[in-house]
């Protein structure tokens, strides 16, 4: 009887040990599952963010070139813009004002003396230095 009791206690200890080991493995698997769910949520949020950002560029043609070719194209565009220079904002304002004076609501043209006034103002604006910030 004493041997039966010891045998049963050994079996209970082995079963408890096995149960604790399996519970530990279960916790590890649950943690891995939780980490994967968090990673999945992060990837999904990033995908949604990129999709929303991409929607801002609808109607724009994408250029499928290697990065080095795109960098070269960007440098060419930047140098072209640098050669063009900044916009003389005052010239645009004067142009809009003179254009408004030049054409009335019916689209009729004003007399030649008005055109000469416009040309004089334009010549004055062209001789003035453009502001560096473009805002005068």
Image: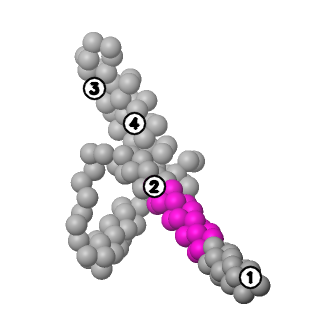
Looking at the image, residue 135 lies above or below residue 100: below
Q: Which stretch is magenta? A: 22-44
Foreground mark, 3 or 4, reads 4
**Label 4: which secondary element:** helix
Dot 3 corresponds to which residue? 112
Q: Is residue 30 on the magenta stretch? A: yes
Dot 4 corresponds to which residue? 95
Neighbours of disc 3 within 10 Å: few (<14), some (14-19), many (20+):
few
- Which of 41 and 128 lies nearest the eye of the viewer? 41
Quarter occupied by the N terminus = bottom right
Residue lying furthest front: 1
How many angstroms separate mark 2 from mark 1 (CA)?
63 Å
Dot 2 corresponds to which residue? 44
**Label 3: which secondary element:** helix
The location of residue 5, given as percent across then percent down, is 74, 80
Q: Earlier in the sequence, mark 3 or mark 4?
A: 4
Q: Earlier in the sequence, mark 1 or mark 4?
A: 1
| Residue in view at x 43 percent, y 30 percent | 97
- Is residue 9 found left or right of 43 in the rendered image? right
Q: Which mark is residue 40?
A: none
Foreground mark, 2 or 1, reads 1
Disc 3 to disc 4: CB gap under 8 Å: no
- Which of 5 and 74 lies nearest the eye of the viewer? 5
Disc 2 to disc 4: CB gap under 8 Å: no
**Label 1: which secondary element:** loop
| Residue in view at x 39 percent, y 46 percent | 56
């Amino acid at each position: 009887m004493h041997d039966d009791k010891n045998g049963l206690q050994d079996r209970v200890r082995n079963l408890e040990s096995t149960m604790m080991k399996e519970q530990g493995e279960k916790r590890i698997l649950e943690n891995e599952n939780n980490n994967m769910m968090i990673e999945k949520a992060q990837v999904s949020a990033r995908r949604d963010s990129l999709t929303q950002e991409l929607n801002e560029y609808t109607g724009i043609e994408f250029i499928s070139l290697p990065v080095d070719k795109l960098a070269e194209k960007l440098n060419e565009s930047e140098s072209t813009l640098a050669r063009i220079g900044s916009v003389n904002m005052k010239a645009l304002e004067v142009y809009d004002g003179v254009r408004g004076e030049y054409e009335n609501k019916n689209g009729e043209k004003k007399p030649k003396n008005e055109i000469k006034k416009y040309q004089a103002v334009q010549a004055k604006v062209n001789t003035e230095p453009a502001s560096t910030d473009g805002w005068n």
